[in-house]
Amino acid sequence: MARAKMKNSASEISTTSKIVPPITREDLNGVSLLLPTRIMGSLTSDGGQRVQVEFYVNENTFKERLKLFFIKNQRSSLRIRIFNFSLKLLSCFLYIVRVLMDDPTQHTICPIICFFFNDALFLCREAILWVERATPLWAIQVTVAIISFSETMLLIYLSYKGNIWEQIIRISFILEMINTVPFIITIFWPSMRNLFIPVFLNCWLAKCVLENMINDLHRAIQRIQSAMFNQVIILICTLLCLVFTGMCGIQHLERAGDNLSLFKSFYFCIVTFSTVGYGDVTPQIWPSQLLVVIMICVALVVLPLQFEELVYLWMERQKSGGNYSRHRAQTEKHVVLCVSSLKIDLLMDFLNEFYAHPRLQDYYVVILCPTEMDIQVRRVLQIPLWSQRVIYLQGSALKDQDLMRAKMDDAESCFILSSRNEVDRTAADHQTILRAWAVKDFAPNCPLYVQILKPENKFHVKFADHVVCEEEFKYAMLALNCVCPATSTLITLLVHTSRGQEGQQSPEQWQRMYGRCSGNEVYHIRLGDSKFFMEYEGKSFTFAAFHAHKKYGVCLIGVKREENKSILLNPGPRHIMASSDTCFYINITKEENSAFIFKQEEKQKRKGRGLYDGPSRLPVHSIIASMGTVAMDLQNTECRPMNSSKLTLPSENGSGNRRPSIAPVLEIADSSTLLPCDLLSDQSEDELTQSDDESFTVLEYVKGYPPNSPYIGSSPTLCHLLPSKAAFCCLRLDKGCKHNSFEDAKAYGFKNKLIIVSAETAGNGLYNFIVPLRAYYRSRKELNPIVLLLDNPPDNHFLEAICCFPMVYFMVGTIDNLDNLLQCGIIYADNLVVVDKESTMSAEEDYMADAKTIVNVQTMFRLFPSLSITTELTHPSNMRFMQFRAKDSYSLALSKLEKKERENGSNLAFMFRLPFAAGRVFSISMLDTLLYQSFVKDYMITITRLLLGLDTTPGSGYLCAMKITEEDLWIRTYGRLFQKLCSSSAEIPVGIYRTQSHMFPTSEPHDIRTQSQISINVEDCEDTKEGKEYWTGKTNPRNSTSSDQSEHPLLRRKSMQWARRLSRKGNKQANKTAEWISQQRINLYRRSERQELSELVKNRMKHLGLPTTGYDEMNDHQNTLSYVLINPPPDTRLELNDIVYLIRSDPLAHVANESHSRKSSFKAEQVGNPETRDETQL
């Protein structure tokens, strides 16, 4: 309410009067809240004279001013309440002083005597009604009473709103009158000064004042304390008031009885309220007994209500979590994890990876989640290992109060994860974006680690310190899986923290080697501070990489210049190492956790003799022993003639002259000698001398940047492109158009095998599947056609983005439709990628989200056994159902191994599952650790993007693969291969993808195995474990019966031949032979089943008008297993069909560094460099 006050009338103001300028709100800053705020302005009257007017913001009355001071103003009202609280405590203290000064024994003669009707017991009313009160004490109590009474009446006046009885009948007002009015009366009636007044009841008034004071305190300091704390304070105050009231009341009433002291009264109250009831102290007169009954009744009513409220708040706090105290936030380190919904898998992945690093053991994790804590999560957080380090808060990141509870402004970092199980992934991204904005607004200095799902939403959170886009990484990884097998497994193992001890107790050698190599991770160190690389300062990168691997067993993969923030993977021999360079290497453990124990070098170098001329192995100058949890086993320098390091080639024309077959790696490489080669052969001539048809095919592609990017933020990549964009109608594989009449994959006549991608929709992330397969460094003659099998038709925006790429087509269909699979050319494909569908990610039972995908893939696995299928799953635990075999005892053994490794605390318990080890299954949740690991290794996201081809930094290499053929086996070991690649093509190997036959130890005679191979081809065995059961004699004896052999005549005839042959072997082999015969019968039965499946597929192909010549149902590889070896030891033997992962240097960087004089002579070789260097045989 505002009111105006006229300062001067129109007649009193002359035309020459001074006009006061108007006062703005800025002038009011600093004005005391106790004064009425007013705004002054000037108005012009009709006569031209100006009138000054004051506009009051608050009511300018005496009552309003008092109300502002006593009630409305937070700080002043808080001071008033503190003063009032002090008065109540003072009055209680004065009562105790009066009791201690009083001596009830002086009252021996009672002027008034009252008898009971039933007994002779009498009461001395004078001892109850009158007490001894010293004059100074009376004066102080009267002063306190006057002040309290005045304040109470003033507050009644200020709070009056028309109903006076509402103020009078309040309990607090009644108690105030009882404790103050009698003292005021004694001023005018001196004979009443010793009248007993129950001043101890002020404790209840103090309790009410304390409750209001706490509320005002929270308002004044603008901080919200938990309701749990307030309720605990109220409960404690209630208990104290009950005890204090009972103690003082019983002590006073017992003045007419046993004259109990305050301490005995206090003791009696505690014993009574605690329900112990010793009975040694009891009230003797009926008034005190009545008071005890009243107090017990009050306690039975009040305390349960208080406890109920406390328990309710405690339960709510258990659901929503408490607060992370400011003191802990300032003295201890913590990170905040913001999620939409917290699942047990997500929580355990985060905790295991986060606390796997030693320097993070003292960190606390504060989880901020808007949903109630899951039961499984609650059980995990109750484990002592996590209960002391993980704090769960139920709240929203969009509320400053919840961010304040989590102490976000003091956090070391904030991880914001998306809910990938949502059906609408775009909506999930929108929630993530808002959370990131809210955190950045509340705590601008807190580092942000954001996980986003859709690539088109990535630019909204580009301000974050680290961003992982799920679909970008997923599609790029699945694409590389098609040209570099098991890339998904390679990257997953690199971004997981592992001890390298998994599988070391297994009897299988491949599990021990695979588990040992899985402990390799990416680390970094400054070259000037490193013992690994310090000695290579001034040397070429390739020289440092080879010798560091030979000497220490570490794999140097990249560097970063001090003046340049870009990380370069394998910058090539032209990069000269400097002491300020940051080196990135792959090793079992980081160098800081290693101790160097140097050994005496054996006499292996002679004067004038080359480093590789002697018969010794590759020289290794040191052994590294572990100081932490991981030991690094390196080669010794003992002489082993069988592994001679002298690489020789067969003599020519019978000559005895021999020459070293692998050139040494030069310290400063000569660029003229660095020609791309594939081990022994250079096929550049084949590339340049093609037929006319092939030349025409190659010339129709150009290199350039894609003209249309489907989303903002995609990294530009030089790719193979069409000279002109293809029409949208030409992108449809199964329908002809006016430009061509092809309606199936066979009609196109592709020279290379197809890559088929099955997805629900053509999202922008699918663009990242195409780009790595069309990158400029891929050989043009080895480009695989890409067919997108989509459930829903793509929109024109997506078609506009892919129409510039060669041999990219789409087709509407699903993988559960056999006709669609046949039309898209599945029989001409080498790789099928099944992408997880968004519509199936959410299910009533979480782990059932993959049910449809698993069953469909299992069907394709049975129909097309030769097809390499890479499947994306929502839950990694479901990978055990991929290529499921009901009676596969080997898979059961792997399941037990997985459980054992999980019990031992492994973060990679699923790594021994055959589909994962072979790179046939992938879950994007496995890459969550990439974001977590970035907290310690801020370069991991950048290195992973470079490896996957998502980013192309000038001068940085790329990941590719090469296959070991029979012509390459003379190299023998991985260390010699490392030298060959570094010295010839400057390529850095980082690992091996090994496929080996599923063979097991056997003690059976050789002729039995030979006869079995002659009698029947068992290459199509479906159970990988059944072969082991035969050779080890562990097959169930029920399968050894011969009564069922008549079911298959062919089997019976073969079995009779085997029986006659085996009858000579004696009874010792009888049981094993019978088991083996039964095994062959099962294999024949399965062969018959596959023939039925084959007939089904061929009939559908005939119905669709497709030729059946390309379908071969028997060409499968189910009796093999594959696995990845990251940075294996140098003495690892190479095997046939090993696929070696390489980081190949950027060919464009070589072109840019050539001098002008060499451009003309070297131009053809450099233009053909990507083609000639990519001689992979996949």
Image (cartoon, grey):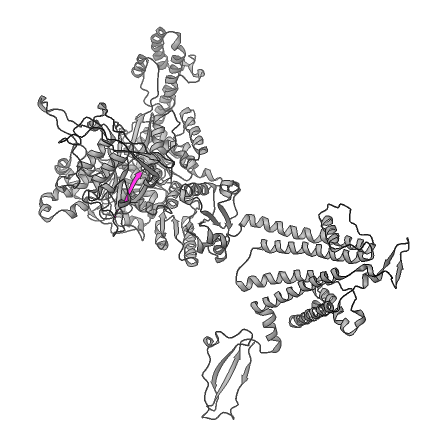
Can the viewer see residue 807? no
Image position, residue 938 (x, y; %)? 34, 47
The answer to whether residue 125 is magenta is no
Q: Which residues are magenta?
A: 580-586
Q: Which secondary structure dominates the residues rendered in magenta?
A: strand
Q: Residue 886 versus residue 891: which sits nearer the camera?
A: 891
Q: Residue 785 versus residue 235: which sits nearer the camera?
A: 235
**Quadrant position of the C terminus in the picture:** top left
Q: Which quadrant of the figure has residue 1018?
A: top left
Count of numbered badges drawn on the protein:
0
Image position, residue 726 (x, y; %)? 24, 47
Q: Residue 1049 versus residue 583: which sits nearer the camera?
A: 583
Q: Is residue 1103 left or right of residue 186?
A: left
Please determine whether, in this image, residue 651 is positioned above or below residue 375.
above
**Quadrant position of the N terminus in the picture:** bottom right
Tell me which residue sits at (74%, 71%) in the image: 184
Q: Is residue 645 left or right of residue 17?
A: left
Image position, residue 695 (x, y; %)? 14, 40
Please determine whether, in this image, residue 404 is positioned above or below residue 511.
below
Image position, residue 378 (x, y; %)? 52, 43
